[in-house]
Image (spheres, rainbow, N blue to C red):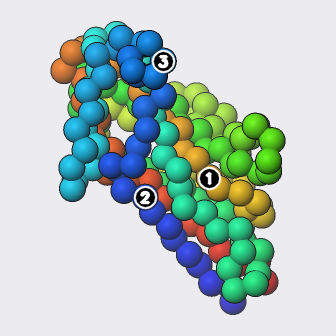
Amino acid sequence: MSDTFKFWTHGVSVIPEYTKQYTGHDNGLFMRRAGWGALVRQNANTENWFHFAIPSATMLDDDRVSHYRAWLRVKVNHYAVIDNIQIREATGPSIESPVIYNTHDQDAGFSISDQQGEFSFELHHSSCTGPLLMCVHAIFNEDAGEILFVAAGGWFEERT
């Protein structure tokens, strides 16, 4: 029987892609990081990608590892929506990190709005060859749009 490993990263580690400081996007991004996670707001009618580096194992107890699932713990109010989640794997020294999971491929109507909880994403049971990255696309429909990122994680199993 193979061992199961579940790794998590806290919501305070989330990184926004588009910011005024680094990319020149004046989207009104507001982030507050605290013990409960990262609270995010933006101006109405803006969107952004948010990224979590998920701690990942490629070898455990001298055995190769497969990735099975990823999770996102989040709270999204009525004025914001998460409409796409991608999981990428940095498979080698190249700049590419191929998408190994995309909610648009699984469910064309995927949407998280006015909800909170733990959302699960079934990954292909293939060998993990590099770190995983969760990419979360969010749309802020009104100035009151708000997302609380609590955690992101991954499930790995030894390939015996």
Q: Which residue is mark 3?
A: 23
Where in the figure is residue 52, as x and y percent of width and height? 48, 46
> Picture quarter containing residue 155?
bottom right
Q: Which residue type does callout 1 highlight?
A: Leu
- Disc nearer the start of the sequence (2/1): 2
> Picture quarter containing residue 26?
top left
- Disc nearer the start of the sequence (2/3): 2
Q: Nearer the viewer, residue 95 or 38?
A: 95
Q: Which mark is residue 132?
A: 1
On screen, residue 46 above or below 17: above
Residue positioned 41% across, 43% down in the render = 14
The secondary element bearing badge 2 is classed as strand
Residue positioned 19% across, 21% down in the render = 144
Q: Nearer the viewer, residue 112 or 89?
A: 89
75 vs 102, left or right, is: left
Residue positioned 33% across, 44% down in the render = 149
Where in the figure is residue 4, as x and y percent of width and height? 59, 78
Where in the figure is residue 117, as x and y percent of width and height? 32, 51
Could you tell me how far apart the alpha carbons at marks 2 and 3 are, in whole angstroms? 25 Å
Q: Which mark is residue 9?
A: 2
Quarter of the image for the N terminus: give it.
Answer: bottom right
